[in-house]
Amino acid sequence: MDAGECSTSQPPRPSSAPGSSPASASAAWAKLVPTDPSYPEVEVAEDDAVVCSLVAPAAGGEEVAWCEIRRNGGDASSATIRNLSSDAIIVDGKIVKQEAVDIKPRSEIVSGPQKEGHLVYTFEITPSKDQDKNNVKIVLDIENAKCSICLNLWHDVVTVAPCLHNFCNGCFSEWLRRSSSKSRDKSQSAACPQCRTAVQSVGRNHFLHNIEEAILQAFSSLQRSDEEIALLESYASVKSNIVLGKQENQSRKRPFSRSSDEINNADLPCPQCRTEFGGFRCSPGAAHLQCNGCGGMMPARSNVNIPQKCLGCDNAFCGSYWCSQGVNSSHCNLICSQETFKMISQRHISRLPVTVHGGNPYEKDITEKCIQQSGKTLQAVISEWISKFDNMEIDRSRLQLNNVDAITSTTYICNHCYNKFIDFLLYWYRVSMPRNLLPPDAVDRESCWYGFMCRTQHHRPDHAKKLNHVCRPTRGNP
């Protein structure tokens, strides 16, 4: 709006674009609410995003494009406003010329370069009832959407009852097949791979299947290879609800918790209790460790070269131990893959974990761009920072693992702790990077007061994108 056009007795009145149909109005997803109640609200529709200004209304006026408001893709809680007028406007106290800026609910928009003589609006999002029904957001930690057998995101998820734990169809079907082949009592229920509760029934979970697909759309890096999917589907045997084991005399009371000796001797047999492997057989009453990955048992041995516990979390994992003893899944179905528990220096990484930088996808994207611009592979960058870690060149206080001073590149840790270790190394990779080497869209961002500890970044995409969170907290610090 030109200065001469603002000299009317009344401020220019924004309105929907000329020629907008009733259908457009009915599809309004947002509105501009004037601070002066004598003026009408202005509705914004998906197919009618241009807001016009009625210049010199006393003389009949003409409509001039004022601004364009569009919803941000993938984020229903924010939008972008673009100034289309010949003069500046004010958005949340900042002068905006012919450019686009982000707005959110309760953003203040002034239709000219100053409040005096111009209308002031508040931006509001008004989803329809149908949109409310169809766009329900569910906040889910991806770690809770993983199968505890293969440790990957569910594929064709099934749920077991009564404990309601979830697994890949193929993983649980193969577990069930192996449990049945090892069981002496064919009528006995299989045990849940996660909590060892007797499974009474299992069925496909269509609701979680939809969540599984939504996660894959948001995080394509979690997609398995075609070969893995084909193998899982070849194992899958759960097509509908299946009742397992005996169902007589079911009690409403909590089941009696058996002693550890009963569990060791019945549900969770140790291969070396039955047979000698690697020159060793368990003596009667020998102490055992329960694997945190598969739930199986192994003897607690301090005189072997292969560690049995992850130094990062102090949990036991059996994969590397049984591999060193020459035991595989043909000897016992309760054995983890060796990949679940390995030496740090023996691991290879080709893609960033989804959980890196606290699960902030914008920070993860910036780090990926930085690595690409360096001309190095992710593995090469990680290897460099592992060397710095070994040489004590990094402050370890932020590493969220146990026994941090004892961890080196030759330490055995589990997959979960390895992801935490990678997150720690990439944090230092980012904070030590000169600002001029950051991608252009990350150079001018201010740092969040709460840094990597910020909780808002997990539920406010606009906040996660606008501010840098790969930094130390400064709120309240001297």
Image (cartoon, grey):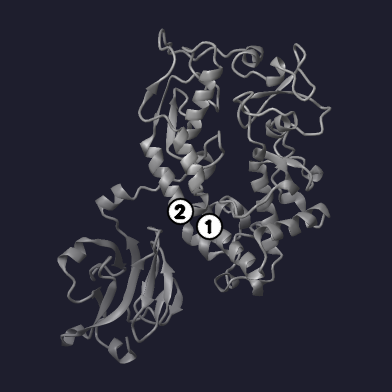
State the residue at coordinates (67%, 45%). 418
Residue 339 or residue 103, whichever sits in front: 339
Residue at the image position 63 percent from the left and 42 percent from the top: 416
429 over 154 or under it: above or below: below
Check disc 2 and give the amino acid type: Ala
Residue at 77% across, 42% down: 411
Q: Are discs 2 and 1 less than 8 Å apart at CB?
A: yes
Please tell me which residue is depicted at 41% across the width and 75% down the height of the picture: 100
| Residue 404 or residue 28, whichever sits in front | 404
The one nearer the camera, 59 or 356, is 356
Q: Position of residue 59 (x, y in %)?
A: 17, 88
Which of pointers 2 and 1 lies earlier in the amino acid sequence?
2
**Which residue occupies the foreground of this view, 176 or 151?**
176
| Residue reaching furthest to the top | 249
Residue 361's label in the rendered image is: 1
Q: x and y percent of residue 183 in the render?
A: 54, 15
Q: Amino acid at mark 1?
A: Pro
Is residue 44 depicted above or below 113 in this figure?
above
Dot 1 alpha-carbon crowd within 10 angstroms: few under 14, some 14 to 19, many 20 or more: many
Q: Is residue 254 left or right of residue 42?
A: right
Residue 218 badge? 2
